[in-house]
Amino acid sequence: MNQPTKPQPLEPPFPPDQSLVELSKITHPAAIRSTTSTLLLPSQDHHAYLTYELSTARLTRLYPHLWLAGLPVPARPLHRQRLMDRAIVKTERADEHLVWHEHRIFVKPLPAFLLSHAFWQEYLCDARDASLHASARGMLLSYVWLVAHRSDHAVAVAEKLIPEDVTWERWTAFAESVLAASDLRAMDDVDMRYRYGELRLSRLDMLTRWPLVAWESWSARNFVDGYMSSSTWYRAFFEQHFGWLVAGFVYVSVVLSALQVGLATDMLSKNSDFQNLGLGVTVAGLIALCLALGSIVIVWFVLFWYHVLSTIAFVKRIRLEREKGAQEKITSP
């Protein structure tokens, strides 16, 4: 009878002599705002902090459809991002790392603790949470993609994406160790998100809003905010989602102007077919204008009341949690 094979122990993706940061020199933030809009204290819940720093669970749920947002190839290095006129915008969320929109690409600065062999052994090589280990390896691999040349290293240091005391020579030796410990063909030792490189934000918004893609994680907030909410202004929302209406009305105005010029001529002013065409286009344009304005008003109305009601519910929940905490503090010995 075949016995089940034991899982392989998790190991750091580089040897101790290639460690770039000492464990004693790693400083974690005192508090961070978690995804639930509450304060997370790394000193009290280290695992939750590391999960916030490294987890790409949202993209993992979308993995079967990520081909719509990007290609399963390494991300372009930093000098190439600059060549493509993309501004490097720093984000502290791993699931926004290497997501791009128009002339911006979001990059998470490489956490210093990922460069410490001792930290990996103590906190990340826990067989009970292999997903966290895979996410950490994926983050390291993404920086091997981004910092491939000396010019990339200069950009990374200038943008404070990697520690400034990590020289090009030390980084190259470190990257070689990471690549040697990685299965670049199967890519089964990194989180599934890192089997893709750069991801387009507009496509991620579409996948997040479409309920049939990941029904178990779909919510009204996801539908309103999309994958990455970048503004809380209604004007920005309507400019992003209804800007195409302006171009549509410009084309309709050009057509109506041409029809008006045609009707002013002797030949076409007496042509009944042309007059019917002008009448039809005019009526269709007016109907389209009314429908567009009506849809904008309806969307604004729905968004306004959604935010009002969700804010009331959120404030009520936070107040109850604080009252509960105060009550427990009073009753505790």
Image: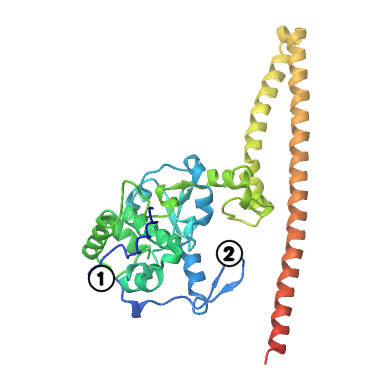
The residue sitting at 27% across, 55% down in the picture is 179
| Residue 67 vertical position relative to residue 286 in the rendered view, above or below | below
User: At which x and y percent is residue 221?
Assistant: 67, 54
Residue 252 visible here: yes
Q: Which residue is nearer to you in this view: 122 or 299?
A: 122
Q: Which residue is nearer to you in this view: 275 or 169?
A: 169
Direction from residue 51 to residue 212 in the image, left or right: right
Residue 264 visible here: no
Question: Which residue is under mark 2?
Answer: 35
- Could you tell me the amino acid type at mark 1? Pro
Question: Which residue is under mark 1?
Answer: 16
Using the numbered discs, state the Cα–Cα distance from disc 1 to disc 2 in whole angstroms.
33 Å
The residue sitting at 30% across, 55% down in the picture is 182
Q: Kindly state the secondary structure of the residue where label 2 is placed.
A: loop
| Residue 292 vertical position relative to residue 80 in the rendered view, above or below | above
User: At which x and y percent is residue 254?
Assistant: 65, 26
- Location of residue 131 by image quarter: bottom left
Mark 1 Cα shell of 10 Å, populated few (<14), some (14-19), many (≥20): few
The residue sitting at 62% across, 34% down in the picture is 247
